[in-house]
Structure formats: structure tokens, C-alpha cells
Image: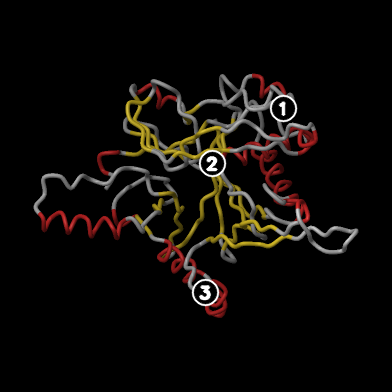
Amino acid sequence: MKFYSITIKPTSPFGTPLKGDTIFGHFCWQAAENDLLHGGLDSWIAQYKNAPFAVFSSAFPRVAENGREFYVLPRPFLPFPSVGGLSTEERYQRMTKRKKDKKKKHLLAGDDLAVQPTPENYCSDEELFQLHINSIPLEQRKELRLLTGKQRKLSGKFVQAHNTINRETMTTGPGRFAPFSSENIHFLPGLKLVVFVLFDEQATDIGRIEEGFVNIGNWGFGRDASAGLGRFQVIAVREEKPPAQKNGSCYTLSPCVPESKLFKTGYFTPFTRFGKHGAALLGKGKPFKNPVVMADEGAVFTPTRAAVFDKPYIGRAVTGLSKADDRTVMQGYAIYLNCDIEKIQ
């Protein structure tokens, strides 16, 4: 399978986070409407349970420091070391350090995508914000600080009010005409996001995948795309060296549903996907999918046998989702990076 990175630049707020399973769903709709898969979408969906034709990661920020660029990944979801058996003073020092470390929710990885879970590679929201500030022209820095106020993050959630007007009274009212609000995700101006994709060359090629992404960026991604949310530009597509697979643990780059009895340990944050159909299936009268509990990106799984590393992905397809179309599948697969769990602190 080929491994590529696709760099995008958000040009509007987003109503839906750019997670791998949702990106897969958008690409499938593009493939259904356009010639993006050899032989058509249906033939590849039919064999999706046995092997994926494409696996998408979630979108991760890319920042620069001292002339080098880094991917901003989630800090691995692992328990902190135990404080049992320590003296009172040692326990106090350990707990004080743990309180500081909890703010460092991100892990920096270089172009080699090596996951090195050491303290110097962890970053807080404030530190990432400063890295981005330092990478933009001087005249834009003051404006950006005024724009963000006290919120020192690469992205933030802001509430947007909505009104539906009753055309008989020409005002809002009770029921479906009641005002409501929703949270939108805003990214800092100039921020670049990277999505990794692993695909079968027999199914498609990078040109068609790029075409799908360009279309998604033009039409909008996720909730309220028709109202202008979820817009982005594709600014770079690059073939990457496949991450090295070897003995150790698997660090995931998207939400996934791991295979049962294949991992002896697993550390993750549960993520529940309440999916909804789009495009043509939206008007079938049953738009909502069954909920799926997944392991969010940044999970760490230790396999029971080395054969797991023979494939560049883990997880499985999720079926039985839809009451509108029983062919519906969901990406439960995830690209993974090798991670030595013994070195994680």
C-alpha cells in the first residue's frame, strides 16, 4: 500500500472535527459521485471487511521550530506512573510534576514520524500557540494576539447563534422557530493541517485521492457545509516513507475499533460516533446511524503476536450501522506508528 500526506489549509470554521472515520465517509461519497476508484465504489465496499482500499488519519497541525517542521500528535493515552511506595516528599514532588505534565497534551513528531514519548517532545497548548506565532510575519503577530485574546490554542470552539424566522409573524418563536446555538471550530489563520492516507494501488491513485480532497474542500466538510463551514484548500501532497513496523506497540492516528483478542493491553480514550447519513441517503427518512464506540486517536495497543506488524494498519470495518442502506460501512481501521511503551513517561 502507498503512504501519502495531504496538507490542507482551513479557510472557514468547521462544524465537525476532521477525524479519520468522517474523512473516509466524505471520500466515499466523492467516489460514489465521481470516478475515483477503479471499478467503482460498490465493488470495493463489498470487500472492505476483508481489506480496506484506503485508510485515512485524522488531521493534525504542522508547526515549525528553528527551521524544522513537526507534526502535532495527541499525547499517548497512558496512565501516569504510580506513586505507591514513595515517601511523602517524593509523592508530593511526583504529584506536582504530574499536575504540570497534564497540561502537555500534545506530542511533536518529525518528518520520520518517529513517536518518541519523552518529556522534551511534549507540548502544551500555550507552547504550540507560541510556535505558530513565531512562524508568521512580524506584522501579523499583534493582530493574531488581539484576535485570540486569552485563548492561546491552535484551535478553539466558539458559539454561533442561529435564528429561524416564522414567515407569518416575521419573527422567531417557540418550537422549531426558537433561537438556538452551535459550537464551531476555528483554526488560527495560516495554520496547516496534515491528513495521512494509506491506499491500495489497485483501487485508486494519489491523483484521484487529491481530486476527492479538493472537491470536499470546495463543497465543505461536515455539519453546516451548505452554510459555508468546513472549507479548506489542498496546498501539498507528498509521498511519505511508510512508518517502520517492528516489535512494540501500535500508536493510532485515527479513531478505530481494534480486533478482539489480538492485543494484550490497550490504553485509549473512548470516543462515541453518533453518525448521520449525507447526500442522497439523507432524505430516506432514516438519516441517523447506530452509535459506535471507538478508541480515539492517540491510543496505544500492544499486540499478542508479531504478525500484527505485517500490515500497516490495525482495526476492522464496522457494519450494521444503517437502517436506510445495509451496505453502509464505517472506517474502524487506523494507520499506526510504532511506539515503545517502555519509554513512555
Give the amino acid type for the residue marked by disc 2 in the picture. Ser
Callout 2 crowding tier (Cα within 10 Å): few <14, some 14–19, many ≥20: many
Callout 1 crowding tier (Cα within 10 Å): few <14, some 14–19, many ≥20: many
Residue 56 is marked as none
Residue at 33% x, 47% y is 116
Give the amino acid type for the residue marked by disc 3 in the picture. Gly
Q: x and y percent of residue 69 in the render?
A: 46, 58
Left or right, residue 79 beside residue 269? left
At mark 1, the secondary structure is helix
Left or right, residue 153 beside residue 249? right
Disc 3 marks which residue? 149
Residue at 64% x, 55% y is 14
Q: x and y percent of residue 224 in the render?
A: 72, 51
Q: x and y percent of residue 333 in the render?
A: 52, 31
- Against 325, residue 127 (above or below) is below
Q: CA distance from mark 2 to mark 1?
A: 20 Å
Q: x and y percent of residue 79 in the render?
A: 30, 43
Callout 3 crowding tier (Cα within 10 Å): few <14, some 14–19, many ≥20: few
- Mark 1 or mark 3: which is in front? 3
Q: CA distance from mark 1 to mark 3?
A: 46 Å
Disc 2 marks which residue? 57
Disc 1 marks which residue? 41
Residue at 55% x, 74% y is 144
